[in-house]
Amino acid sequence: MSKQNDSELLYLLAVENYKYRKNLSEEETQQLFNQNQIYENILMQYESLHQLDIVDTIEFIEEIIASNVNTLKVYHGTNYKFNKIDLTKSKNYRDFGTGHYCTILEKQAISWAKQMYKRRNTGGIYIYEYDLLLSDDLKVKRFTQIDEEWLEFIKFNREKGGLNHNYDIVIGPVADDNTFETVQLFTSGILTLNEAITRLRYNDLNNQISFHTDKAIGLLKFIDRREISE
């Protein structure tokens, strides 16, 4: 099983336990978890949480909710320096549409930057760090599992290009180089939906957060930019 898949299962188990303990509906629990970025926090703390039982996980979640801090640290990896995010320079035919792509996983951002530097052989390996303050008036789409909706969304955006939705931010899994081929085989019609999902569930997938509007970009607070060696 992949880290992403294990995180999905732990998240779903936490939703079930939390709503039972707090006598909440699933919709109320999901809304509360989304407001406090619970899934993203579970993914970031996966290495320690997957060794604990569900009681410890619920305590971890309750601490996050009690802290009432809606800031999420995100990273962007690239091969060039810039001072301002310009959405007009976004690449086309991306998973979630044209936008500025970040991740909650620093090592993922480093991997992106190294790949871009190697492909283009120019610039450097730069990691940008931001604090994201999610707001209730943002339209955010979250994919917390590898499923039909997630894969169809990617297929649609890669085929159409541009921006074909009205979300400010989209959060969800991203396939690494080893699983990119599976997504390509699905979008080209060689693999069926079920075949693609089955393959992807046994591969490591990482996290990506895409920003699609100036309103969303405005909630990114620049913290640091650093250059790392190859």
Image: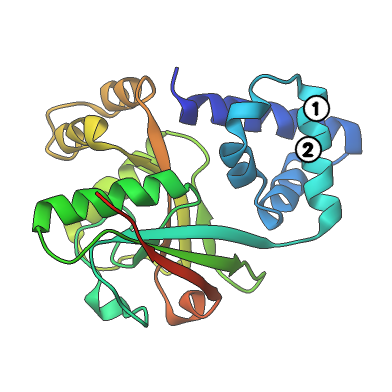
Q: 123 left or right of 84?
A: left
Asked if disc 1 and disc 2 are in contact, CB closer than 8 Å, the reply is yes
Where residue 53 sits: x, y (%)?
Answer: 76, 19
The residue lying toward the viewer, choosing from 217 and 46, is 46
The residue lying toward the viewer, choosing from 58 and 160, is 58
Q: Residues within 10 Å of mark 2 (few under 14, many from 20)?
A: some
Q: 225 left or right of 200?
A: right
Identity of the residue drawn at 44% across and 53% down: 103
**Residue holding disc 1:** 56
Identity of the residue drawn at 67% across and 28% down: 49
Residue 207 lies in quadrant:
top left
Kind of residue sitting beneath label 2: Phe
The vertical placement of 167 against 185, above or below, is: below
Kind of residue sitting beneath label 1: Asp
Where residue 201 sits: x, y (%)?
Answer: 39, 23
Identity of the residue drawn at 15% across and 32% down: 185
Label drawn at residue 60? 2
Where residue 155 sits: x, y (%)?
Answer: 25, 46
Element under label 2? helix
Element under label 1? helix
Q: Residues within 10 Å of mark 1 (few under 14, many from 20)?
A: few
Quadrant of the drawing holding the N terminus: top left
Residue 214 visible at all: yes
Residue 134 lies in quadrant:
bottom right
The vertical placement of 56 against 187, above or below, is: above
